[in-house]
Image (cartoon, helix red, strand yellow):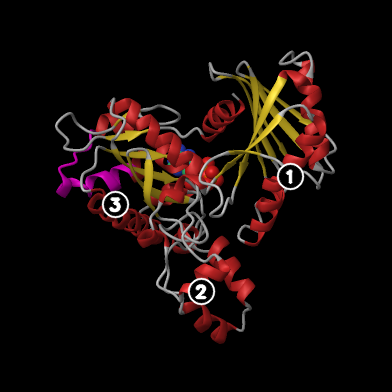
Amino acid sequence: MKILCVNAGSSSLKFQAYEMPSEKVLISGVFERIGIDGKYSMKINGEKIKKDASLTTHEDAVRILARELISNGIVKDLNEIEAVGHRVVHGGEKYSDSVILDEEVLKTIEELSDLAPLHNPANLIGIRAFMKEIPNAIEVGCFDTAFHQSLLEDKFLYAVPREWYEKYGVRKYGFHGMSHKYVSSRACELLNKNDANIIVCHLGNGGSLSAVSNGKCIDTTMGFTPNAGIIMGSRSGDIDYSMIPYIMNKTGKSITEVDTILNKQSGMLAISGVSSDFRDIEEKLRLNDHYALLSHDMFVSSVLGYLAKYYVELGHVDAICFTAGVGENSDYVRKLIVEKLSPFGIKLDENLNEITRFGKEGIITTSDSLIPCFVIPTNEEVMIARDTYELTN
Ligand code: ADP
């Protein structure tokens, strides 16, 4: 059975086609600059193809994708695509799992746009474009928030008036759910233990940690929005909210301007003064740049705070996992973090840490480490494919 996985953003559309249940990737790629000029790239059998195309709308991208699927022999007829799984950022409190998309669900996703104004509308445009182009396929929505719906009240409520939650939905939602779900379940496979307690460190441009027990998420660092939790590439992470009215008074900036600064001009970018990209900052580290060093110290400290918290909340930990751009590739950041975990009896294997990068999966601690640390490259797409396959069958 052939399944397409789709992640539609406001000006991009990423896709991956799978043969299921073997999970063989048939084709993957991305359409970019939709609504600007348009280009796309695809990977088939290890070969990369880049093309320009006029992409006025997402529908143009889906039409070209349909043509490419046929001309590259992935399908003879579009009806061979039996299901399309869509990444949807916000499922609110309504969805604790992936669901088959019908008009009622689409309406709810639209209503939830209040909570994710940049993402849900773009996801919807993508879904509608596929419904039009491949009308016979079953469409499935896989929510970034769903995996965290298992959080209990004491973890998802904020200490603010209860009516903020009851009337306006102010609570911790958590994000990166498909990644946390994939990595924690893969860790259980590596440990050969289904009911393991896992801490997942998803360290990318955006970053979040989760504490997972017996396959259920019990706590996570992102909150009402993705801006909460650890320091990120360009997001502040946790701050004292009182600095917002203070800075507005001092600078005359509007709430929108300050919000944008906290999302796009803060985090590692603001501290290092170099970039939001850890690779650029690591270049400066080699020159002993004070602010590059400081940004890493602050980043590591923000991760360690949550690691220690989750260690206590879980009671015991079977594995700590690193994933996403930084977690998968930066042996330097992992070393800084894991070495600080020595009070927990965790011991880094420097050699394993150095070689486990660029898509490799593996353990990076010594055999006598009390808790193993793994690098597990995330695979949100395959998680979408699995959920879509399961629901379709
Ligand atoms: P997102 O999905 O949140 O955009 P990713 O998980 O793709 O982010 O991670 C992207 C980030 O990973 C980059 O901004 C960069 O900071 C970091 N990264 C990627 N490769 C490396 C590397 N070799 N060394 C250090 N950091 C890296």
Q: Secondary structure at mark 2?
A: helix
Find the magenta span and give its range: 334-349
Residue type, numbered disc 1? Glu
Residue topped by disc 2: 163
Residue 77 on image: x %, y %: 79, 16
Neighbourhood count class around disc 3 (C-alpha, 10 Å): few under 14, some 14–19, many 20 upward:
many
Q: Earlier in the sequence, mark 2 or mark 1?
A: 1
- Is the Cβ of the residue at disc 2 closer than 8 Å to that at disc 1? no
Residue projecting furthest to the bottom: 249
> With respect to residue 197, does 208 lie above or below?
below
Quarter of the picture holding the C terminus: top right
Residue topped by disc 3: 310
Q: Earlier in the sequence, mark 1 or mark 3?
A: 1
Q: How many numbered marks are there?
A: 3
Residue type, numbered disc 3? Tyr
Residue 370 on image: x %, y %: 16, 37
Residue topped by disc 1: 103
| Label 1 CB-ligand 1 distance < 8 A | no
Reply yes or no: does residue 342 show up in magenta.
Answer: yes
Cα gap from disc 1 to disc 3, whole angstroms: 39 Å
Residue at the (29%, 47%) spot, across then down: 337
Quadrant of residue 300 in the image? bottom left
